[in-house]
Image (cartoon, rainbow, N blue to C red):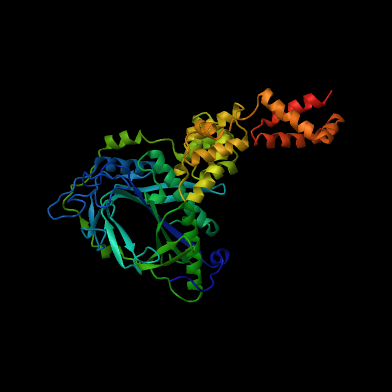
Amino acid sequence: MTVTTALPTFDEAIAAFEPVMGMEVHVELGTATKMFCGCSTTFGAEPNSQVCPVCLGLPGSLPVVNRVAVESAIRIGLALNCSIAEWCRFARKNYFYPDMPKNFQVSQYDEPIAFDGWMDVTVDAETYRIGIERAHMEEDTGKSLHVGGATGRIHGASHSLLDYNRSGIPLIEIVTKPIEVPPAVAPAVARAYVTELRELIRALGVSEARMELGQLRCDANVSLRKAGDPYGTRTETKNVNSLRSVERAVTFEIRRQAAVLSDGGRIVQETRHWHEDTGETTSGRTKEEAEDYRYFPEPDLVPVAPSREWVDELRGTLPEPPAARRARLQAEWGFTDLEMRDVVNAGAVSLVSATVEAGAPAGGAKKWWLGEIARVANERGVALEDAGIAPADVARVEELIAAGALNDKLARQVVEGVLAGEGGPDVVVSARGLQLVNDDAALGTAVDEAIAAQPDVADKIRGGNLGAVGALIGAVMKATRGQADAKRARELILERLQP
């Protein structure tokens, strides 16, 4: 149900209570096949077309571990400064849900492949170290589609459809230790952590980590306590699917829990659903404890024992850490801290970098990705990289501007055309007739006509009032539908009117 009572403000909530957070992030690995079988993991295939007896949990089927998934798990663990287990094994996590045909999930319980690590994040120039409890391997469940209701959830639906294509796709679950930071920055630290983790996963190349596609899913745990008290009862807000929503969900839970505790109530340990439209969480189900899952070792899989030589070999494949890469790029681009923060918050670091590598100036690349392209992406509800324009296209637009073939107004029309699917920049320029008019013959005619049409303005210029030149330039721009080279038009006007 929706919250109807007035909640305290965030500042009021943290004045009375200290929040403690924990983040559980599931990363869907970009392997070609599933965790324990050879079925394809291609996204968007016909429902139930990528299944076999293993991922459907049919009797007698036997799983085989995906080596690339294990390798990815080790690389993630190393990048998170974790220790890598010399010996670990899978377990069965037993619970019933329709999208899990075996009635258990193959996961890791008390013997994860990576454990005891950390990641640093920065908020408002302060660095906070986030402890990593574990990173373990598991398989994903299928996907339920609830039909007939207003919300797309099971409550109120007339029936449900099940797609098992996702069942068995490799996941890495990364679990933090309790996060205790100054209360005022807690939501921002939660967002910064997921942002940094996403960048790290992308840098490793083990997943595209696109939250809107469910490739990276965050469960945000929040509890409140009085200063000096033991930890309070936590809630877990499930499957928060954007960076902005991570921050908003944590903020809301702090306010909601503070309202309950201030009224003398108690927090129920439960999972909760995040509603993007209302900015609220609602109750899902009572949260199980580990013993409720009746974990026991998976009898059909041998333990995983990565050799130290293999681990050292994988350590040598780690990329430049995202924080170090950002610092290097910021210095190369000459961006201020605020400019770089805007690029990071927009998720555009790699896009701007690729555009610069294609030949564009850093400032121009930033302008387009955080301006016109971001606006269109927001309108369409898609990620920046899915807006419909490539870094090479943006670099070509900047090249045309530098060559004097486009001005800013025409360039915006070119970008608009590319985003609309009309082709690359050169195709759009040609098809829309957007070439800048800068040859003296064509431009001279427009200048002469403007002077003849406004003799009083021309007289002012002849008398030394150069501020009046703008009126004639405006007339030239109107006559050429905005395609005149304004700088050259000014030069021609002054050549004609000044002795």
Q: Is residue 317 left or right of residue 496?
A: left
Position above or below: 161 against 171: below
Q: Quadrant of the N terminus?
A: bottom left
Viewer-proximal residue, 180 or 429?
A: 429
Viewer-proximal residue, 440 or 167?
A: 440
**Looking at the image, which residue is at 27% across and 36% down?**
310
Q: How many marks?
A: 0
Quick one: which residue is furthest to the right in this view?
463
Quadrant in the rendering for residue 409 = top right
Quick one: which residue is furthest to the bottom in this view?
264
Q: Position of residue 250 (x, y in %)?
A: 47, 60
Q: Position of residue 262 (x, y in %)?
A: 51, 73
**Looking at the image, which residue is at 13% across and 55% down?**
59
Q: Position of residue 467 (x, y in %)?
A: 80, 35
Q: Is residue 118 left or right of residue 337?
A: left
Q: Is residue 57 left or right of residue 141?
A: left
Q: Is residue 394 left or right of residue 209?
A: right
Viewer-proximal residue, 477 or 81?
A: 477
Q: Is residue 335 visible?
A: yes
Q: Position of residue 286 (x, y in %)?
A: 34, 69
Position above or below: 441 against 348: above
Q: Is residue 227 visible?
A: no
**Looking at the image, which residue is at 40% across and 66% down?**
150
Quadrant in the rendering for residue 413 = top right
Q: Quadrant of the C terminus?
A: top right
